[in-house]
Amino acid sequence: MVSWESIDTVLLDMDGTLLDLRYDNILWTNLLPERHSQTHQLPLAHSESHLFAHMDETKGKLEFYCLDYWAEFTGLDVIELHHELKELIAYRPSAEQFLDWLRKHGKSSVLVTNAHRDSLNIKNEHADLIRRLDETVSCHDYGSPKEDQRFWQRLMDEHPFDPQRTLLIDDNHQVLVAAAEFGIAHLLTIAKPDSDKPHREGLDFPALHDFQDLLTHE
């Protein structure tokens, strides 16, 4: 899927790419509405429609990814909800081996995530992720999500890379479109970001099933 002779830098998304999206999906679509319903003494269906409608309104914006924003909007301790599901934090197939392979082969590895730093830190506690990468960047560091060209320009300014010799792996279609617009030449998406859900079909970018498929063996 990849010609490694043409790539120096690998940009990697976290949720749904390196880590199983099952954790986040259960947190945001099940646990959050349940606790909102209990805390505010509302029917579960009311909490679901209220929260999901606002998620749709903010999708692709910085607020959508901000834990502080959702804590204020819901009146809940969103960080504590993250800790409650910590046993679900898990790597996608062969992701750990892939990160070790990148380092062994001298490729620069940079985590580029829309996740809030608090979310990244919780996941790092249980997946030991940060030490496996050369750099970690959250969109909250730059004030713009990855769907926004300003994110990519700030990334270039602070962690210079050659877009023509860079690979981005991300499960978010709009992020991949934005990266392509910025000029990143090598783009892959994820066939199955959530281990509980079926493989996605009809994707506009080449889809990775298992990181093992990217490894070369001497």
Image (cartoon, rainbow, N blue to C red):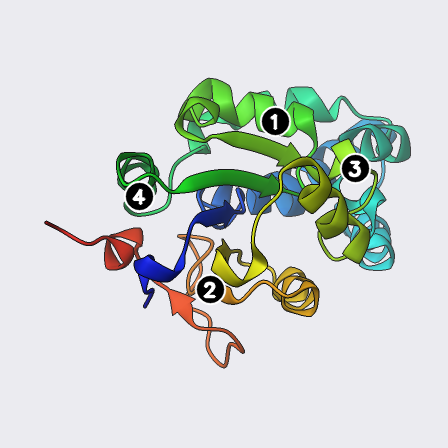
> In the rendered structure, which amino acid carries the disc numbered 2?
Leu
Quote the CA–CA distance across marks 1 and 4: 26 Å
Badge 3 or badge 1: first in the primary sequence? 1
| Residue 60 appearing in the image | no
Mark closer to the chain start, 1 or 4: 1
- Label 1 belongs to which residue? 82
Residue 207 x, y percent position in the rendering: 41, 68
Amino acid of disc 1 = His
> Disc 3 to disc 1, how far (Cα)?
23 Å
What residue is shown at x 46% (from left), y 53% (from top)?
Answer: 194
**Is 97 on the left or on the right of 187, as rendered?**
left
1 or 2: mark nearer the eye: 2
| Mark 4 residue crowding within 10 angstroms, few (<14) / some (14–19) / many (20+) | some
User: Residue 203, how many percent across, how many down?
Assistant: 51, 76
Residue 4 sits above or below residue 128 on the image = below
Q: CA distance from mark 3 to mark 2?
A: 24 Å
- The residue that label 2 is drawn on is 188
